[in-house]
Structure formats: structure tokens, C-alpha cells
Image (spheres, rainbow, N blue to C red):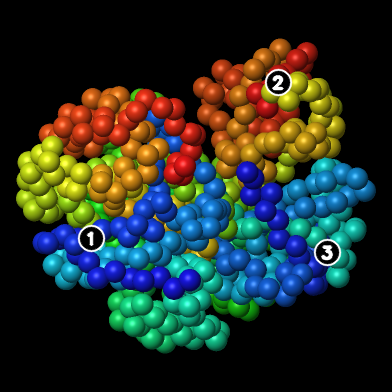
Amino acid sequence: MSASDHLIPVVVSNVVEVNPIIKRFEFRHVNGDELPAFSGGAHIVVEMLDDGTKRKNPYSLMSSPFERDQYAISVRRDDTGRGGSKFMHEQVQPGMQMKISAPVNLFALDLRARKHLMIAGGIGITPFIAQMAQADKLGVPFELHYAARSVSQAAYMDSLADRFGDHVSCYCDDQGEGIDLEMLLSNQPLGTHVYVCGPKGMIERVVETATNLGWPAAHVHFEHFLAPPVGEPFDVHLAKAGIDITVGAEQSLLEAVEASGTPINCMCRGGACGQCETVVVACDGDIMHNDHWLDEEQRASRQRIMPCVSRFRGKRLELDL
Amino acid sequence: MTIQFKDESFRGDFTYANSPSNIPRFPFPFPEDEYMYSTNIEPHHAARVGSPFENAFDVDEHYVAEMKDRALVLADDPGRCQALPHMETAGWDFLELVMVSKARDYPDLFKLTMDGGHWHWINKPLQIDDTFTFGDSSTLPCHPMEYIGRQVQGDHAILDQRDGNLWMDAGIITAQADWSLDFDIGMNFFEWHAPVPLAHELGVFQRALKFLLTLPQGQPSRRLNWTLTVNPRLDTSPENYPKWGPDKLTVTPENIGEKVHLRVELQTFWRLPRSNAILFPIRTYLMAMNEVVTQPKWGRRLHRVMRDLRPELVNYKGLSRYHPILVEWLSQFDDGAPTSPGIFPD
């Protein structure tokens, strides 16, 4: 049973162009019911019916966890991606009915923290908007440091500064500004937890700096914003189902399995939660793993694959599905 | 259907018993004639009208008596209810889940009125009529977990999720089968399961943890667990071992049918929305051997399960002292006929 099998019917209540590359989408329950409560950092999976192709992409909830009449997400347009963000930007209009999953949180605040230090890059700002609302209500100190390429791309910078005042610091590359991580991380009180969401390089720099400064690993939290990569089409044999399927260039292996009607567990669809882990029966070629779940040893064994983000190049791939 | 709540005791004179109509709804834990650990987790869907799986939180004829017993335990030992400071949000999540579920499933017994943050809760069986502000602990007489924990059958642990593990950081535990919240609080999933034999080697806990870490909101799961208890005593805590340990010595072939009780835990798992914690209710059902064998399928099967139980498990579950007598006594209910699959009586 997958989280995305239990979908909530919603209507798009608002679409806001935040800047040239980011749009905000707001959803309400089709019946006007309350949506499920959630915790800051949670995401939903949005189902998109795009001209015969069914896509499901995860997006962080940015509305307040204490408001249940509507959810909000922000989508950054990526013209080189698989088409989900393009669909959201071009096709989704107010009044449209869609389906979303219940919230899932793989990036929760550690509620033991004496202070939350949040570091966001670009569209990685979205989970922090909900987390700040939560930390604010709980009365726990927090600070947000938000870096963007340019003032025009820095979504919500002004409104966050208005809402949370001195708790928010912004940095724009085109103004020559950058976060001094060494300074920031070496000046925190004991009991601070740091959270980072943004480009891969930024996450690595924060984790490395914190580690070098002696931060306990349990106080460093990150969420990779991971979309399944595009690539060359490939064929897969599903052993239990006894069928062969083809994974398209802009399709994920998970989506191809789902499209064939073969049952498979999944949740985050982004290589992080581990739910879709599948046994590899035979592999003559290379698995491009891409996930954050399997360890090096498991990858080297070539006996496990995460179909949500991994691809294959070679002669034969056979899975226990 | 209005439930007739029983006036009974789980200590002293032990007047606890199951009404004849209550026996067939007992969650008999053995779907097959032999028992070995398995993760045996299934979705906690509403299932089978009249069974303990019909509603999110089962309420039966023992409700009022169990809540009185809980109050006695807490008065004697407040350490049975503990929450680390960061678990307050989880306590509110728990309170909301129980109130919303009970008001929906038992409208004749419980009523919840929500006016924004102002809530009005009526619990008719326990004669409670309170108003409070959701999220504001100063408007309740105690921690939200304790407040609602005193009104719901079964023990409740609340597990914080972080660092790819679960941590037992809160709970109200007064009816446990020989484990201790005071000992386990703050431990992670592998630490509190450390004493369990065989299951580690079988990889049961790794699989169970992986399952729980990805438990989605709105899709609770359940499993059954079991042991045996001498006398219908709910509080078999290590803290009170001197009170119940010696009971094992009192079992004889003459009294075994009334003394030895099958003790079943209906364990459910719920993702809590605001705290992202996992609520782990452990609802205990007790049934005397004499009551169990009124269902021929259960009598036959229980004999086979007990006869073939691995020695490590006989020892771990604390049955060694009377296990041979029990197998001998149960054998009279086993005519060798096949049993039907599943746990429900024929």
C-alpha cells in the first residue's frame, strides 16, 4: 500500500506568479473539508494527469501547519526536467480539480532543539516557511539564512522579512552577498540544530562545515530536493509479473512500473524514504542509483535498486516485482 | 448498541471475567497451529462488525473498570506516566486523535464539540464534561497525554522520530506485560527491544523499524502480540514483580483453567500529524483458559501452539514454571481435527 494510493481530491483555489520562474499553487478540499494537519517540513505528492501521462511529484508544504482550510506549495519551473514543473506552470489553473497525497514528513524539526538554525538555497526555502510558522508558535528561537541567485529570484524574501523580522537574513549572489557558514555555525549556542535545504553543493558545504566545527551529526539535518533525472530509455523485466516494460527518457522506473499496473510500494518518490526499495534479480549493466537511501556496500552488491530515482544502462535488468 | 460496563477488579479478589457475549470478540492471536515471530503487521482498517478491529479505539465492557485500575496505579506510582519536554505537541496530537475517533465511533458515549481552538469534551461512561483550549496545557488539569490516557483502554507509548530511529520519549503505561517505561524512556527502538530473543537474528526489528519510519499519516497499522498471565492482573510491571511473580507458584492442574489467562495485545501504530511522532497504543485483552476453550477451534489450536513453542520463548514469556501442566491440561480440548485458517472462532 502506498501513501499515494490514498489521494485527497482538491480544487486549485489560487495560482500566484511569484516571479518569472516560481508559481505558488493553493489547494482546498473539493468538499470544503479540513485538510490533514501536518508538521513543518512535510511534503505532499501532487498527481498530474498530463495528456495520458500520469505524473506524481513531491512538493514541500509552505502554508502554516496550523491552517487546515488550504495547502500551498511553490513550484520552480525547470524546462530541462521531466515535464512536471512545466505542466504545473502551463496547465494548472484556478478551479481545476487535482489529487494530492496526505502529508509525509522526512524533514521534521527536532523538537528537542533549543534553537533552530535554518539555511535555505533558492526554492529550498519552501519547507522552512512552514517550519518557521511552527517554531514561532512553539516559542522556540529560530533563524533563517536564505540565499538566492538574484533579488528577482528570491521568492518570498520580502514577505518573510515582514513576518519574522530579525529572524530572517537574506543573501543575493548578484549583490555579492553570501552566507559565511564558518562564522554562522561557530557562533551558535549549544543545543542548536541546523537544517539545510537547497542545491547539493550547499548541503555538502553546510554538513562539512558543521562536522569540521565539531557539531554532533544528530544536530545536522538536510533535505535534498531531488527529482528523478531524465536519461536514455531502458527495458526492465518484472519477474513476478512476468512482463517486460520500457522506461521512457522522461519517465522514472517507478512511474513505468505503476503504468504497467504492477503493485509497488512508494512514498517520497525522491530517493529518500526507502519505501520502494526493490530486489534486483539479475543485472547485466550499470545501475545509476541517484538515491540517498542505499549505502555504498548495497550499491556495490547490485542487488538493490530504488525505482523512484534510479536508472539503468546495459543489456538486462530484472527486478523482483 | 449500548455497552453494559462491568464493575470488576484486576487485583485483590480478581472479579474480572468476560461475559459470554464478549468471548467470541476476543482477539485470539494465533492464525495457525504454530507460533513464530513475524512482523505480522496489517493495515488497521475498520473490519468485522463486533470485533475489536471494528473501530479505531475499541471500547468494551471492561472500559470503566480498566480506567479505575489505571487511576489506582498512577496514584501509587506517578512514574508510570512520563513525557520528555519536547513531547507536548505529540500529547495534543494523541488527545485529538482519541477524541475525534471516539466521538465518531461511539456517539452515544462520547461527544466532542470544536469551536476553533475551544473544545468541549463529554465522556459519559466516566462522567467527564470539560472545556479547554486546544494546544494550551494550562487549560487542562494535567499533560494532554495523561488527560486522554486516563480515558482510553490500553497503554500508550509515543515515539519521537529522528536520526532514522524511533525513541520512546513519552508514555502512559500501567498495564504492561513485564516491561517498564521508567527503564525504557529515552531509549531507541533497538535498545528497548534488546531483551527479546531470536527476533534480532531473524531481522524482524530491522524490517519493523523500516516500516514504521515510513508509516504514513491517515493509514494506521496493527499487529497482535501475546503472553500468559496468572490471574487477570493488568499491572504486571517489573516494579511490582513481588506482587505478581509468586502467583506462578499457585498454578495447579485443578485451578489452571481459571488462573491462567491468555493475554493479548492489540498493538496499533499511528503517525501523528503535528509532531510527526508515532503513537503506539497497546490494548490488552485478558481471557481465562476456561473461557478460551469454550471456542473449540481456539482450544485445539492453543494446545498445538503451546506444545510446540520454542524453549527460548517459553522462557522469555515467563511460562516455564507451569508450561508442562498447561500443555497437559489443554490436550483434553484437542481432538486432532484440523483447524480453519485465521483467528476468528468457527
The quadrant in which residue A276 appears is top right
The image shows residue B272 at horizontal and vertical percentages of: 49, 60
Q: Which residue is mark 1?
A: B16
Q: Which residue is mark 3?
A: A97
In this rendering, the label closer to the viewer, 2 or 3? 2
For the residues labelled 2 and 3, the Cα–Cα distance comes to 37 Å
Q: Are marks 2 and 1 on the same chain?
A: no
10 Å neighbourhood of mark 3: few (<14), some, or many (≥20)? Answer: some
- Front in this rendered view, residue B316 or A303: B316
Q: Quadrant of the N terminus of chain A?
A: top right
Residue B135 shows in the view: no
Report helix, strand or loop for mark 2.
Answer: loop
In this image, B123 relative to A159: left or right? left
The quadrant in which residue A152 appears is bottom right
Q: Which residue is mark 2?
A: A239
For the residues labelled 1 and 3, the Cα–Cα distance comes to 55 Å
Q: Residue at x 15, y 65 (%)?
A: B77
Chain letter, disc 3 residue = A
Chain letter, disc 1 residue = B
Whether residues under marks 1 and 3 lie with C-beta atoms below 8 angstroms apart, the answer is no
Residue B194 shows in the view: yes
Chain letter, disc 2 residue = A
Report helix, strand or loop for mark 1.
Answer: loop
Q: Are marks 1 and 3 on the same chain?
A: no
